Amino acid sequence: MSRLNGKVAIVTGGARDIGRAVSVKLAKEGAKVVVNFYESEADAKTTLEEIKKVGGEGIIVYGDMTNQSDIDNMIDKSKEAFGDSVDILVNVAGGLFARKTIEEIDDNFYNLLMNVNFKSVVLVTKAVRPLMGKGGSIVNFASQAARDGGGPGASLYAASKGAVMTFTRGMAKEFGPSGIRVNALCPGMIATKFHDDFTKNEVREKVAAGTPLRREGNAPEVADLVVYLASDESSFLTGNNIDINGGLAFS
């Protein structure tokens, strides 16, 4: 029997890269998956096709996870498709958007980074909480940047992900008595569009060479860890911020 049979999962930012790998892996393990997307419906449809290829079940829902009405709509769509409970929440949605020094940061950029990377996690967690009971699992996405301050021009991104780490610990304490676990991942250099857009090839090669495993990670490896944290196999793990970086940094 698959590990997640009969469970309902919501994945924010589930349309591509790590979000897609997580959505497909959850579905492969038996979960019914609500795939949230914001930028590309085509990407979301591709993710849904991959879910169906592995024999899974899912829906795609557009939404800005910093917008309460969009979050409410996502919850409504989940209820319509899969009933009034949610067993798994994976908060993947986030972004770097640009590399900026402190002199270049303005109010708009600050609000964008903090809202997309942190406010979204708070609002979606709040919305899902009433639907989640004993055995529920929330997996947030922080970053290695939250531990080391990030690369050049990523200080605000790192700070927003640091907030996710601390929020994860706080929610683990708050939700624990109800039997709900809350953990977060701190990915290092994972081969995704994120680094295609914001990290130079020579930097990626140098980072990979300096990693004990001598390579970048990949999205399915991250998805495997998410599924473990979502399953009962990790039933005594909560409040953790787990590194997945090939040994690039230790905590």
Image (cartoon, helix red, strand yellow):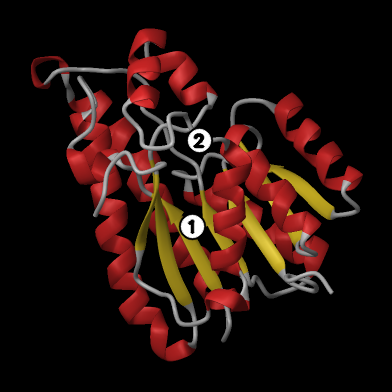
Q: Is residue 12 left or right of residue 242?
A: right
Q: Does residue 149 lie above or below 152 as drawn? A: below
| Secondary element at tag 1 | helix
Judging by the rendered image, the residue that carries numbered circle 2 is: 217
| Secondary element at tag 2 | loop
The CA distance from mark 1 to mark 2 is 27 Å
Residue 229, picture quadrant = bottom right
Residue at 71% x, 52% y is 25
Residue at 52% x, 27% y is 191
Which corner quadrant holds the N terminus?
bottom right
Q: Is residue 82 left or right of residue 224?
A: right
Q: Of the residues shown, which amino acid type is indicated by label 1?
A: Val
The mark that comes first in sequence, 1 or 2, is: 1
Q: Residues within 10 Å of mark 1 (few under 14, many from 20)?
A: many
Residue 38 x %, y %: 59, 33
Q: Of the residues shown, which amino acid type is indicated by label 2?
A: Gly
Answer yes or no: is residue 22 visible: yes
Q: Residue furthest left?
A: 103
Residue 195, picture quadrant = top left
Along the line of sight, which residue is nearer the eye, 165 or 79?
165
Along the line of sight, which residue is nearer the eye, 140 or 60?
140
Camera-nearest label, 1 or 2: 2
Judging by the rendered image, the residue that carries numbered circle 1 is: 124
Q: Residues within 10 Å of mark 2 (few under 14, many from 20)?
A: some
Along the line of sight, which residue is nearer the eye, 24 or 134?
24
Q: Is residue 161 left or right of residue 64?
A: left
Q: Are marks 1 and 2 in contact (CB under 8 Å)?
A: no
Residue at 35% x, 66% y is 240
Which corner quadrant holds the C terminus?
bottom left
Answer yes or no: is residue 62 visible: no
Residue 92 x %, y %: 51, 46
